Amino acid sequence: MAEQCKRGQFSLELLVAMAAYFALIAAFIAAENSASAGLAAEARALSDRQGASLACLYLDYFSLDARNTAVRLDDWGKLAANGRTVFVGMENATCLAKIAAEDRIRVEQNEKEPA
Amino acid sequence: MAAARGIISFALILAFSAALAHVAASRLETEKQSYAAKEALLALEKRYYTDLDVKGAFRQALASAQGTGSEEKIVDAAGKLALLEGFAERQYAERGIQLDLWLGDAGAGEISGLRRSMLEENRALKPLGAVDLSAFVLDWRGKPVPLAAALLASDPASGKVFVSRNTALVPEQPFLRPVFGVSIYFDGVAAVAVIGEGFHG
C-alpha cells in the first residue's frame, strides 16, 4: 500500500513537470506561429510592393511606346489605378504615366506612334 | 517520454517548415511577377518595332514608285502596296505575329473598338468599313487598278507619292476615308498602326 502511494506521488511530480514542459513548448509554438504569420504577411506585402512597382514600370513604358495598343493583363493579378497611383493588394506605387481605371485601365499617351 | 519529445520536435519542425514554405512561395511569386513584367515589356517592344517595320515597308513602296507621270507612279506604288499585304502577313506569321493590312474607314472610335474585338477574338481584324490592301477596283476607263491608288496622290513638284484621297484616277469611294492601317495581334497584344493623310515615301 505504501509502495503504491509513493509511486503515485512520483507520477504526480512527473505530470507537473510534463505539464510545465508542454506549456513551454506550447508557448514556443505560439510565438513561432505568430512570427510565421508576421513573416507571411511581410512576404505578401513585399510581393505586392514589387507588383505595384513593376506595374508602374510597365504602365510608364506603355505611355511612351504603345499608342493605339490594347493588352490583356491576365498575369498581373488584380490591379487598380487612380491618377498616377497603382494599387496591388494593400500596397501602391506612384507612376509617371497618367492612368485612369474604369472597366479597364487606360494610360495617357505621351509619345506619337512611330511614323 | 522519448516518444513525446519526438512528436513535439516533429511539430516544431513542421511549424518552422510552414514559415519557410511561406517565404519560398512568396519568393517564387515575386520571381513570376518579375518574369511576367519582362515578358510584357518585351511584347510592347515587339509591337513597336512591328509598327515601325511595316510603316518602313509602306514608305519604301511609296518612295520607290516608278513611272513617267504621276498616274503611273501612283499605280506602281499602289501595286507594290497590294503585294506587300501577302508578303508582310506571311513573314510576320512565321514570327508568331498576326498582321492584317487594310485600307478604308477607321475613325478613332472604330480603332478603339477594333482593338477590343481583336483581344476578344485573339486575332488581327480589320475595321468593318475597311478592305484588304490587295483589293482591286476599276478606274475611270474600266481598267483594274489596286484600290490603294484611291488613297495615293503625287506631288507635281517633287514627284513624291503620298497618302491622300485621289479622285482623279479612281472614282470617289464614299466608304473610304484616306487611311491605311495595319492591325497587329500576338500574345494578348492588339494594336492598330494608322498610316494617314500626308504619309510619304
Image (cartoon, rainbow, N blue to C red):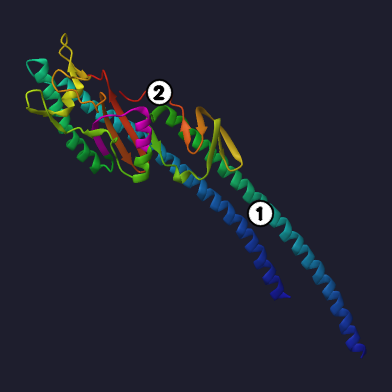
Residue ranking furthest to the front: B174
The subunit carrying tag 1 is: A
Vertical arrangement, residue B195 with respect to residue B157, above or below: below
User: Is B148 left or right of A108, judged from the image as shown?
Assistant: left
Magenta-highlighted residues:
B99-115
Residue A92 position in % (x across, y down): 58, 36
Q: Residue at x 28, y 43 (%)?
A: B96
Position of residue A73 relative to residue B80, above or below, is below
Instruction: Label 2: state its secondary structure.
Output: loop
Q: Residue furthest top?
A: B157
Mark 1 vs 2, N-terminal side? 1
Mark nearest the camera among 1 and 2 is: 2
Q: Nearer the viewer, residue B6 or B44?
A: B44
Q: Which residue shows up at 29% across the image and 40% down it?
A: B124
Is residue B178 part of the magenta span, yes or no?
no
User: In which quarter of the view is residue B81 placed?
Assistant: top left
The x, y position of residue A11, in whole percent, is 84, 79
Could you say where residue B6 lies in the image, as x and y percent from the top left?
Answer: 67, 71
Which label belongs to residue A111? 2
In the picture of the structure, the residue carrying the numbered disc 1 is: A36
Residue nearer the viewer, B134 or B188: B134
**CB of mark 1 within 8 Å of CB of mark 2?**
no
**Type of amino acid under label 2:** Glu
> Which of the 4 quarters of the picture holds residue A90?
top right
Percent across and percent down for residue A71 are 40, 39
Q: Residue at x 37, y 44 (%)?
A: B120
- Whether residue B101 is in magenta: the answer is yes
Q: Residues within 10 Å of mark 2 (few under 14, many from 20)?
A: few
Q: Is residue A19 above or below residue A62?
A: below
User: Type of residue at label 1?
Assistant: Ser
**Furthest residue to the bottom?**
A1
Q: Is residue B178 visible?
A: yes
